[in-house]
């Protein structure tokens, strides 16, 4: 639940009207509200293009997170602000679930796994032992924490659509008028940690170094993917829908072969006259950042 390369792609960035820009690092919580629910991203279990990096730090670590709200530290999460961190996920965690397309055809995909059961608890197994049931909190201007997932391309890849996946529970309404979405891609940087190579996004920012929906034209759509997270007997065989978030680029781009990081998130755009109570920080026993059950 929960976590070099100079960029070879140079994108000339121009802000387009109506787009949502990331909140800059300011080392304080931008909203800290609970009334709009929480956005949780789904992980993927396929390892395309010879990827060997998985959720374990010792492999390089396919998940990373960054935060900008000191309230996390008061809740016992003693991570430095405004820098990327890793926490241990699972050997089966390829990164954030990601599908990329070009002209309707899939050119990259790590969603689910090859057996098609990554999100389903096998008979006799506890739900807590099922890697695909865990999700990561991702809202850069509400408790100010996002996850990014590693992915690898073994050849230059042209894309015009990027899809992430999320769980629309925890009180989150995907269609709320004051919820907007962002997607970002970073290049990878290798860091030697006591002789082991750990992998991270190359820039400490909520905004990608290779691509950001803040600055490229495109449109978001979302809906039910048709797949569910399926819990075990210990959760009464509960099911949660998995939804997709799709960003259709205004113009296709080509990513060179290499290693990258991907994130998507929901952000809050206050409406005129809107009033919310600040969150208490009592978000539940498991905490916001990484959760099992919806």
Image (tube, grey):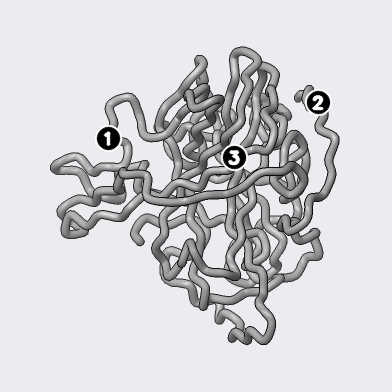
Quadrant of the rendered image containing residue 17: bottom right
Where residue 6 is drawn, which disc sits there? Answer: 2
Q: Residue 117 carries which label?
A: 1
Front disc: 3 or 1: 3
| Vertical relation: 187 (above or below) 212 | above
Q: Count residues near mark 3 (Cα–Cα under 10 Å), then give few for <14, some for 14-19, many for 20+.
A: many
Judged by depth in the image, the label closer to the viewer, 3 or 2, is 3
Q: Distance between the residues labelled 3 and 2?
A: 26 Å
SS for callout 3: strand
Q: Is residue 28 above or below residue 237?
A: below
- Residue 219 position in % (x across, y down): 62, 47
Nearest to N terminus: mark 1 or mark 2? 2
Q: Can residue 45 be seen in this view?
A: yes
Label 2 Cα crowd, 10 Å radius (few <14 / some 14-19 / many 20+): few
From what the image shows, is residue 63 above or below residue 294? above
**Residue sitting at x 71%, y 58%:** 20
* Quarter occupied by residue 3: top right
39 or 251, which lies in front? Answer: 251
User: Label 2 near label 1: C-beta < 8 Å?
Assistant: no
| Depth check, front residue: 80 or 107 | 107
The residue tagged with tag 2: helix, strand or loop? Answer: loop
Q: Residue at x 75, y 56 (%)?
A: 21
Mark 3 touching mark 2, by CB under 8 A? no
Residue at numbered disc 3: 248
């Amino acid at each position: 639940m929960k976590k070099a390369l100079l960029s070879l792609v140079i994108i000339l960035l121009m802000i387009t009207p109506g787009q949502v820009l990331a909140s800059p690092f300011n080392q304080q919580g931008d909203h800290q509200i609970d009334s709009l629910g929480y956005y949780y991203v789904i992980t993927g279990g396929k390892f395309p293009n010879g990827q060997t990096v998985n959720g374990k730090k010792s492999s390089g670590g396919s998940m990373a997170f960054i935060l900008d709200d000191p309230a996390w530290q008061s809740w016992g999460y003693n991570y430095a602000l405004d820098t990327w961190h890793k926490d241990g996920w699972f050997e089966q965690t390829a990164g954030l679930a990601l599908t990329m397309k070009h002209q309707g055809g899939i050119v990259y995909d790590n969603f689910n796994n090859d057996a098609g059961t990554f999100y389903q608890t096998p008979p006799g197994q506890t739900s807590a032992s099922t890697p695909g049931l865990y999700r990561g909190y991702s809202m850069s201007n509400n408790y100010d924490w996002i996850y990014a997932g590693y992915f690898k391309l073994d050849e230059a890849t042209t894309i015009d659509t990027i899809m992430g996946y999320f769980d629309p529970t925890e009180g989150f309404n995907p269609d709320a008028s004051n919820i907007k979405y962002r997607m970002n891609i970073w290049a990878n940087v290798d860091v030697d940690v006591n002789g082991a190579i750990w992998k991270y996004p190359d820039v400490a920012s909520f905004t990608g170094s290779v691509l950001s929906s803040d600055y490229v034209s495109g449109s978001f759509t979302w809906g039910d993917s048709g797949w569910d997270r399926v819990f075990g007997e210990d959760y009464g065989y509960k099911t949660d829908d998995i939804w997709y978030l799709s960003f259709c680029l205004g113009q296709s781009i080509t990513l060179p072969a290499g290693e990258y990081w991907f994130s998507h998130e929901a952000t809050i755009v206050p409406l005129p006259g809107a009033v919310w109570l600040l969150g208490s920080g009592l978000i539940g026993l498991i905490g916001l950042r990484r959760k099992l059950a919806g």
